[in-house]
Amino acid sequence: MPKYLGAIFDLDGVLVDTAKYHFLAWKKLADQLNIPFTEEDNEQLKGVSRVKSLDILLSLGKKSYSEDERKCFMEKKNEDYVHYISQMDESEILPGVVQLLDQLRLQQIKIALGSASKNSGLILRNTKLQTYFDAIVDGNDVSKAKPDPEVFLLGAQKLGVPASRCMVFEDAKAGIEAAKQAGMLAIGVGTKKNLPNADVLFENLEALDLSVL
Ligand code: B16
Ligand code: MG
């Protein structure tokens, strides 16, 4: 019997590289608000919710705004982001992803999405990845953002697999914390420097060897 019966995938940074589009959309807003914002600053926004991303951006500029203004900023940012992701296709799937999903299917391991994004549906449709997923949980389904484990626990529940038999593929520190708090195997996709707490680490999914898990 395989040790793991469920695999839960983060979206941005694991299956596709949408961080570049988030950056372009936040950068446009930052420029309008005269907030200096670099690609390095953008690292802090990876894996965290839209609301938290705006908090970080505004704190970089030491600015504060009313609730209505903040709502309007998030809507504008999302409009720009959706414009970019509307043009995505299969060519933007990261290396090794399809091979890994095929391998998991062959081994009858159930597959779920566990993303903070509220735009996961559009991305999965455009990249034609959605057919691989037995369950989808994203920012529209949860009330607590990563590092809270809610998104992954709900994923496991939807798959009908105990948390202890699930593995999570994540590229963000907050996501690794969430997976560990959920009692799942936290597989980091990235570097030791960015993901020091991952249980297992691979540079990218192409480098992943399922047999070592
Ligand atoms: P949206 P993930 C996260 O997706 C992104 O990494 C993060 O940068 C973004 O702020 C968050 O989704 C919310 O995205 O604005 O589309 O709802 O990495 O959890 O798949
Ligand atoms: Mg991510």
Image: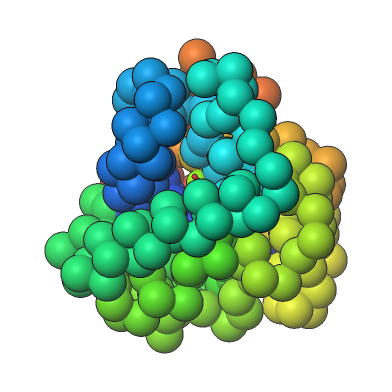
In this image, 166 relative to 127: left or right? right
Identify which residue is drawn at 80% across, 46% down. Answer: 148
Answer above or below: position of 206 versus 44: below
- The answer to whether residue 9 shows anywhere in this view is no
Identify which residue is drawn at 80% across, 61% down. Answer: 143
Q: Position of residue 136 (x, y in %)?
A: 60, 75
For the image shown, how many numbered marks are present on the structure? 0
Q: Position of residue 205 (x, y in %)?
A: 37, 46
In this image, 155 relative to 83: left or right? right
Answer above or below: position of 29 versus 123: above
Say which of 20 and 70 sits in front. Answer: 70
Identify which residue is drawn at 62% across, 67% down. Answer: 138
- The answer to whether residue 95 shows anywhere in this view is yes
Say which of 64 and 151 sits in front. Answer: 64
* The N terminus - image quarter: bottom right
Answer above or below: position of 51 versus 155: above
Quadrant in which residue 207 is drawn:
top left
* The C terminus - image quarter: top right
Answer above or below: position of 160 versus 188: below
Residue furthest top as drawn: 193
Quadrant in which residue 78 is drawn:
bottom left
Say which of 152 and 81 sits in front. Answer: 81
Q: Position of residue 190 (x, y in %)?
A: 43, 31
